[in-house]
Image: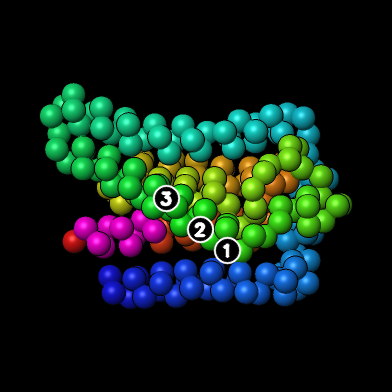
Amino acid sequence: MKFIKKTYFFSLIFLLSLSVNSQLLAQSRLQRWDDGVMIDLQNQRTPEQTGIFLFLSRTHLYGDIGVPVGLLAGGIIGNDKQMRQNSLYVASSTVLTTGLTYLIKHIVKRPRPFVQNINIVPVYRAGSTSFPSGHTSSSFATATALSRAYPKWYVIAPAFLWAGSVSYSRMYLGVHYPTDVAAGAALGVGSTFILQSLKK
């Protein structure tokens, strides 16, 4: 567990250091790769797929709120203390991750892909800044916490399939770079592990 704490701490420091290097990131090979992926995705859009990914993108809030509320309701109805505690763990993981996401967004201030590169055309124009992806970080926090609370394949597989689908939708819709999504996933997973280690 100490290794996980240290790894996550250094990962968080790396993410925060991007605030200092954001101008270098904009001119790097990584940035050119990010741009290339976004343009490839937009060139493959169809109206049917766009409708599906808009729907998936919107499910993040239902999952982030619905999962802990469902666990809390089940724990109250079934008089299950463990389920009520799991509800608090999932909700706390998502709240912590969301707070860290907004902090990093405020520090890094990476422009959205369609602001950074006029060749990238989004399905809709999202506000705020780009790094890291908040939809991704919160959905991965929810999926990770739920999977840690109930480590069964039939919980883990759908949870991460949902989180991955939400994350991919953000790139497909043209509102987040792949590196925004990767950072969001790392932040969501890492925050959840850290929170669980603090409970012990």
Front residue of this view, candidates 58 and 103? 103
Question: Which residue sits at x=65%, y=52%?
Answer: 129
Q: Which residue is mark 3?
A: 141
Q: Which residue is mark 2?
A: 103
| Gap between marks 3 and 1 measured at Cα | 21 Å
> Mark 2–mark 1 contact, CB under 8 Å?
yes
Say which amino acid is labelled 3.
Ala
State which mark lies toward you, 2 or 3. Answer: 2
How far across and how far down the image is residue 82, in percent?
17, 41
Segment tinted magenta in the rendering: 191-199
Above or below, comparing residue 132 to residue 77 in the picture = below
For label 2, count other residues whose C-alpha is less than 10 Å away and answer few (under 14), some (14-19) or many (20+).
few
Residue extending farthest right: 119
Majority secondary structure in the magenta region: helix
Work out which quarter of the rendered image holds the N terminus and state it. bottom left
Lower sequence index among marks 3 and 1: 1
| Gap between marks 2 and 3 measured at Cα | 16 Å
Question: Which residue sits at x=46%, y=32%?
Answer: 62
